[in-house]
Amino acid sequence: MRRTAWRGCLDAELLAFASARTAGDVSRQWHALERAHILSQAALGAHLQVHRLMLGLAVRTGDLREIAGQAFRLALAPLGSLTGRIPWGNTGRARVDAFTPMPIPPDFRDVLPS
């Protein structure tokens, strides 16, 4: 993983999230956070940060399923990091299984572990 490229990609997605939040575009907020989640799996602090942002969005939108799912994932993320069991590519939403790897977007393949 090239740390500088990874951080740049993650920061870009978090900026996209902030811009979408300012615009009130919930769909774009989720899209940016899902992409940020894929990147954040490479570092526990970033991973927890993205799940906190996801939890906040779920609370703001009143999505009870997502609130429960994000609370579960916040508790689970440290265990995954400690055991090395990261489902790479997983978008981090409650609607997808927390343990299932998913395809990594092509524009992230050079900055994430294979």
Image: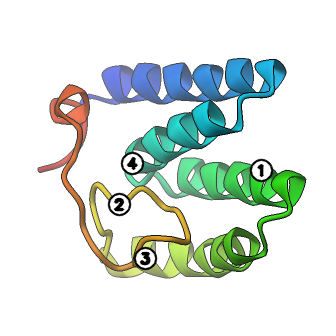
Tag 1 secondary structure: helix
Residue type at mark 3 is Ala
Estimate the x, y position of residue 113 in percent, counting from the top left.
18, 48
Q: How crowded is mark 4: few (under 14 residues within 10 Å), some or many (20 or more)?
A: many
Instruction: Name the residue that disc number 2 marks.
Output: 90
Instruction: Name the residue that disc number 4 marks.
Output: 38
**Residue at 57% across, 47% down:** 46
Mark found first going from the N terminus, 2 or 1: 1
Tag 2 secondary structure: loop
Instruction: Name the residue that disc number 1 marks.
Output: 57
Residue type at mark 4 is Ile
Mark found first going from the N terminus, 1 or 3: 1
For this view, does 22 lie left or right of residue 2?
A: right
Q: Using the image, determine if residue 101 lies above or below residue 113.
A: below
The N terminus: image quadrant: top left
Mark found first going from the N terminus, 4 or 3: 4
For this view, does 56 lie left or right of residue 81?
A: right
Residue type at mark 1 is Leu
For this view, does 79 lie left or right of residue 65?
A: left
Estimate the x, y position of residue 82 in percent, counting from the top left.
42, 77
- Badge number at residue 98: 3
Proximity of marks 4 and 2: CB atoms separated by less than 8 Å: yes
**Residue at 30% across, 74% down:** 84
Observer-side mark, 4 or 1, equals 1
